[in-house]
Image (cartoon, helix red, strand yellow):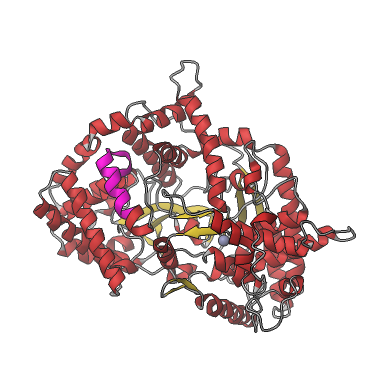
Amino acid sequence: MRLPLTILAALVPLPLLLGQTATTTAAAGRFDANIVDRSANPCVDFYQFSCGIWMKNNPIPPDRAIWGRFNELEERNRAILRSILEKAAANDPDRDAATKRIGDFYFACMDEASVNRKGAEPIRAELARINALRDKEALADEVARLHQAGANALFSFSSAPDFKNSTVELAQADQGGIGLPDRDYYLKQDPKSVELRKQYAAHVQKMFELLGDSPERAAANASAVMDIETALAKGSMDRVERRDPAKVYHKMSDKALAELAPSFAWRKYFALVEAPPVADLNVATPDFFKQMQTLIEQTGLDQWKVYLTWRLVHSSAPLLSDQFVNADFDFYSRTLRGVKELRPRWKRCVDYTDGDLGEALGQKFADRTFGVEGKQRTLKMVKTLEDALGADIKGLSWMTPATKQKALEKLRAITNKIGYPDKWRDYSSVQITRDDALGNDRRATAFEFERQVKRIGKPVDRSEWEMTPPTVNAYYDPTQNNINFPAGILQPPFYDNSIDDAVNYGGIGAVIGHELTHGFDDEGRKFDGAGDLRDWWTPADAKAFEDRAACFVKEYGSFTAVDDVKVKGDLTLGENTADNGGLRIALMALMNTLADKSAPKIDGFTPEQRMFLAWGQIWCQNATGEVKRLRAQTDPHSPGRYRVNGVVQNMPEFQKAFACKEDQPMVRRPACSVW
Ligand SMILES: [Zn+2]
């Protein structure tokens, strides 16, 4: 339902968290000595030791592809959102405007009978417009309408801070327009990939049949869709290359863009999406737009109509009738991710409300769960992590004083956003009714698209958030040099006010450390303290960094994700660096906090052991084989097992804490280390 992530957001966001106790039953998420698998040897497999009992007792629910501690917390947050929305949905004339807006949105979404009665009717008018397109110049009209509706059609257009002048919003044109999770899905020739493409084509065919086409006609349409999407995939840049900010930064004039793809009516498109005058823009992937040009020239108008129809029905399916919902589930959840059952409707409708009216719903969530005290506590903890990272940088053997000075300046410039935005988004212009589930989504999505497009050329508002308050996640933004911790993650098992420091430092402490060190990973280090893409490293220090980073690429690249699929060491480098640096500085901060205090064993574990166990336990998870395979190809994060074992193998402090012997698996020689 949301726009595709901007380059900026996709660059770094990451799962992590902190702690403020919500009003729900928090005990379920706490550090729990009872889930430690004492039959396992921590020096042989620390993940099994930390999570073995949890994994055994927590099979994947049938409506999930992955089930872990993050998801437990998400479910608790979702239950709070549900109670807010059910109350708001009552047709009470005394509701204030914001309550009415989220309540009516949820009501319409939950009104399954009405949604089913309508079938495909909510998109019939748009389908007719696509069928009436008279020439290829009119592609721009329809692509503009689909972008406003939140559909991923042909390419993506938005705004984001200019990498080299990060105080100003720059228009961004980027690759897009495909329905499989990654370009490689269209290009790889191994049997699994070939089979998956067949299943995808069958799904596309099924959706055309649901729109009323004969099986023969629908099959021909699916084939046309595959041709176009495969060509778009061929023109796309792969995920590893996209990690280099310089490779996705090509600022050019609107004329230069028009020269790359003259057959697309750019001027018309910009006018239709009501973009402010676009003189310069970042064309993230110029080769993609060249390919798009060739494709527009070589593909007939009828094929384009088929492709646009597919993009429309695909983006609408979750809010159309059951037939569409179930077909969409069959391919995208069952086949691609190994999920057995569709989630209950209320969970889906809570998530759509969060996605479409996130700050209206999130304001109520924050009111209920997160106080001023939670913010103060978190900020205090962040300060101890920043101090630890500063001390770590000063003590590095491989970095020269000149670069250290710059690194410390960047560290001091990081700003912290905790809990929720200072000012809330105003959705009062979005029309929401009680009987139009898809229309509500479309209008809210158009509002967000327009909001992003309208800020082109304006100063960047650094108080905006890329995540809503209930989100169980956190992110570092390299162009703003800030770390962001939504209220949703500041709870057990990440943080618990009633538990000892060691556990909190292994949870939220390490997560804060993780986000801080993103400012210094393979991507983040290329931006300066002001958020601009600028090289502040001496060549020798850059070389030393890269040599050390190569150690992580090799280490994680040796781990098996599933069957014969390995973790991609280069795709996951930034996250692995952040995990390793984050846990190290969390331990430093814990030791500073514990200094001069007697720190007894609890549950039989020393403070150091409890810190490592807390880190291990936030990553406890079970996942289907399908989703392990999918994530290995697309997710910049390593699987939970390696976020734990991959890190502790590199830490002498861990090996000392558990008295590991030199030849045991959790002792890696040479150990990898950057921060
Ligand atoms: Zn991260």
Q: Quadrant of ligand 1?
A: bottom right
Which SS type dominates the magenta stretch?
Answer: helix
Residue at the top extreme? 93
Q: Quadrant of residue 233?
A: bottom left
Residue 573 in the image: state x and y as whole percent.
54, 71
Q: Is residue 212 or residue 299 the one in the foreground? A: 212
Residue pictured at 69% horizontal, 69% vertical: 406
Q: Is residue 282 or residue 597 the one in the foreground? A: 597
Q: Is residue 659 or residue 199 the one in the foreground? A: 659
Q: Taking the image as drawn, is residue 316 in sight?
A: no
Q: Is residue 204 or residue 428 the one in the foreground? A: 204
Q: Is residue 406 above or below residue 150?
A: below
Q: Is residue 268 above or below residue 594?
A: above
Q: Quadrant of the C terminus?
A: bottom right
Q: Is residue 28 above or below residue 166?
A: above
Q: Quadrant of the N terminus?
A: top left
| Range of magenta residues | 317-332
Q: Is residue 104 left or right of residue 540?
A: left
Q: Is residue 25 above or below residue 166?
A: above
- How many marks can you see? 0
Residue 587 in the image: state x and y as whole percent.
74, 64
Does residue 353 belong to the magenta stretch?
A: no
Residue pictured at 81% horizontal, 59% vertical: 601
Residue pictured at 84% horizontal, 58% vertical: 600
